[in-house]
Image (spheres, rainbow, N blue to C red):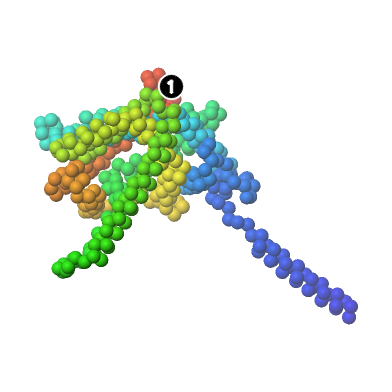
């Protein structure tokens, strides 16, 4: 009897212990490990945060950068590296370490680079020259200037903007991009990381093919530019149609006079409150800008608004019409009087509202969703048919016509509908040739590189001249 009782109590005790163990294991289930921790930091303790990639310790920006890097390595490195060494877990973390050193070095150079001149001087000048050269080349098509009419638009444009990295048929040289990335890596990486040829080559090819190659292919397509413009502009606002009022002739009463007076007082008070709020914000911004004494005596930031106004005038063909030319002269006169303040206000607005961690996080998130839609590299974009590309352009033209109200539109774009339609077509035409867009993209690429790495533009700036037949070329 005692043996039976002892056995029964032992079974009940074991049953309770198994139930308690299952309950405790259910409550202590491990949280899912993120992809960057599994691939890039497999030995990182559970619960610890990822090290910061940049000196600006922004958690959201750091997480997006690591997600983008992990997706890129999983999609483009792991498939072939697993065939070579299936159980090696140290290769991807070593690539991550090299990328982290590279990004910190580029960030340090960006902190001392003249980004304001790049945004407000160099890029507007390049865009203005692109529009002017395209229109010049388009005017020569079919004339004796085009080799008796035999040369097409891309060839004429190439003669106006020759570049060693672009052929006459509008194809860029991948070796040029690869050598530029190679020089950037040699400048940014320490000697021990530069000597690691395998890691260096993989990082270089990721930047050359995955980041720059995919971006160049998409950004040179006219239909892709039209689609981006439509996405940025958004759908047009649908005007609310109000039914026509039925006018009835009634006698003007004292009550209607009181209602009209109170409505006028409410409208005026609302306008006054809005003006006071705007004035307070403007005064606050002016105080902050005037207190930034580091930009007062910087000669590089002199007359920053002039190239931007020139670019807008070139894009809108404002010099071709009297009304828009008068408006352009008035704007230049006003900016000339306020030039000392604008030379300080524009860099402040750039680094406060445009180039900041939230905006960079948003750009990286959009790039990640575009390049890796399902967590893996997506298929190449399906090019729309010619008919669909025409529809995209027509939608963009119609959307651009509805941006400005009637009065500013007639002043800037033209007095009548036909002139405004022609002006909108002139705005879109210089971006409607893929071969010409390659020139624009390569020049912008050069401008960005020379801003961050100015020694690349010097005759003896440390850039080694490699050729395709050089057996010592580290790129080949």
Q: Name the residue under label 1.
A: 462
Q: Quadrant of the N terminus?
A: bottom right
Residue 268 in picture, x, y percent from top left: 30, 52
Q: Quadrant of residue 281?
A: top left
Label count reads 1
Does 2 appear above or below 120?
Answer: below
Q: Is residue 103 visible?
A: yes
Q: Is mark 1 on a helix, strand or loop?
A: loop
Query: Residue lying furthest right in this view?
Result: 2
Q: Which residue is drawn at 15% across and 44% down?
A: 414
Q: Residue 195 at x, y = what percent? A: 53, 29
Q: Which residue lies furthest to the front in this view?
A: 254
Which residue ends up furthest to the bottom in the rendered image? 1
The x and y percentages for residue 450 are 38, 28
Across and down, in percent, residue 325 comes to 17, 36
Q: In this view, does 43 lie to the left or right of 204?
A: right
Q: Looking at the image, which residue sits at the far top? A: 460
The quadrant in which residue 470 appears is: top left
Asked whether 20 or 153 is in front, the reply is 20
Q: Quadrant of residue 253?
A: bottom left
Asked if residue 29 lies left or right of residue 334, the reply is: right
Quarter occupied by the C terminus: top left
Residue 457 can be seen, yes or no: no
For image coordinates 19% across by 47% down, the residue present is: 407
**Is 398 located above or below residue 340 in the figure?**
below
Mark 1 is surrounded, within 10 Å at the Cα level, by few (under 14), some (14 to 19) or many (20 or more) other residues, namely: few
- Residue drawn at x 17%, y 68% is 251
Query: Residue at coordinates 29% horizontally, 45% vertically from top-left?
Result: 225
Q: Nearer the viewer, residue 238 or 428?
A: 238
Along the line of sight, which residue is nearer the eye, 324 or 441? 324
């Amino acid at each position: 009897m005692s043996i039976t009782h002892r056995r029964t109590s032992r079974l009940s005790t074991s049953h309770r212990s198994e139930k308690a163990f299952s309950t405790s294991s259910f409550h202590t289930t491990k949280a899912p490990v993120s992809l960057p921790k599994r691939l890039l930091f497999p030995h990182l303790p559970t619960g610890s945060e990822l090290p910061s990639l940049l000196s600006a310790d922004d958690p959201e920006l750091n997480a997006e950068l690591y997600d983008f890097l992990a997706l890129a390595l999983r999609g483009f490195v792991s498939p072939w590296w697993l065939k070579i060494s299936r159980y090696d877990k140290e290769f991807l973390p070593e690539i991550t370490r090299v990328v982290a050193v590279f990004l910190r070095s580029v960030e340090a150079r960006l902190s001392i680079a003249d980004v304001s001149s790049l945004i407000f001087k160099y890029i507007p000048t390049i865009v203005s020259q692109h529009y002017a050269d395209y229109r010049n080349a388009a005017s020569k098509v079919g004339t004796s200037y085009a080799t008796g009419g035999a040369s097409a638009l891309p060839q004429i444009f190439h003669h106006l903007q020759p570049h060693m990295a672009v052929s006459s048929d509008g194809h860029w040289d991948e070796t040029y991009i690869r050598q530029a990335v190679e020089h950037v890596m040699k400048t940014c990486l320490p000697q021990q990381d530069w000597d690691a040829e395998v890691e260096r080559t993989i990082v270089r090819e990721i930047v050359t093919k995955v980041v720059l190659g995919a971006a160049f292919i998409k950004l040179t397509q006219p239909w892709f530019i039209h689609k981006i413009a439509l996405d940025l502009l958004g759908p047009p606002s649908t005007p609310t149609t109000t039914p026509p009022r039925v006018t009835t002739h009634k006698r003007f009463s004292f009550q209607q006079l009181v209602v009209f007076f109170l409505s006028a007082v409410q409208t005026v008070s609302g306008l006054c409150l809005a003006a006071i709020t705007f004035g307070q914000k403007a005064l606050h911004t002016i105080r902050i800008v005037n207190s930034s004494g580091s930009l007062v005596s910087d000669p590089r930031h002199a007359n920053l608004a002039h190239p931007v106004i020139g670019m807008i005038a070139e894009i809108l063909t404002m010099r071709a019409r009297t009304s828009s030319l008068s408006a352009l002269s008035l704007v230049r006169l006003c900016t000339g009087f306020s030039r000392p303040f604008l030379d300080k206000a524009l860099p402040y607005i750039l680094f406060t509202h445009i180039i900041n961690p939230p905006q960079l996080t948003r750009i990286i998130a959009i790039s990640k969703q575009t390049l890796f839609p399902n967590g893996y590299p997506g298929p190449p974009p399906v090019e729309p048919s010619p008919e669909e590309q025409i529809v995209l352009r027509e939608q963009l033209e119609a959307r651009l016509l509805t941006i400005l109200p009637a009065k500013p539109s007639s002043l800037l774009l033209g007095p009548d509908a036909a002139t405004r339609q022609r002006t909108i077509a002139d705005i879109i035409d210089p971006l409607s040739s893929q071969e010409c867009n390659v020139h624009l993209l390569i020049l912008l690429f050069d401008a960005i590189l020379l801003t961050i790495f100015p020694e690349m533009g010097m005759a003896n700036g440390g850039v080694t001249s490699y050729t395709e037949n050089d057996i010592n070329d580290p790129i080949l």
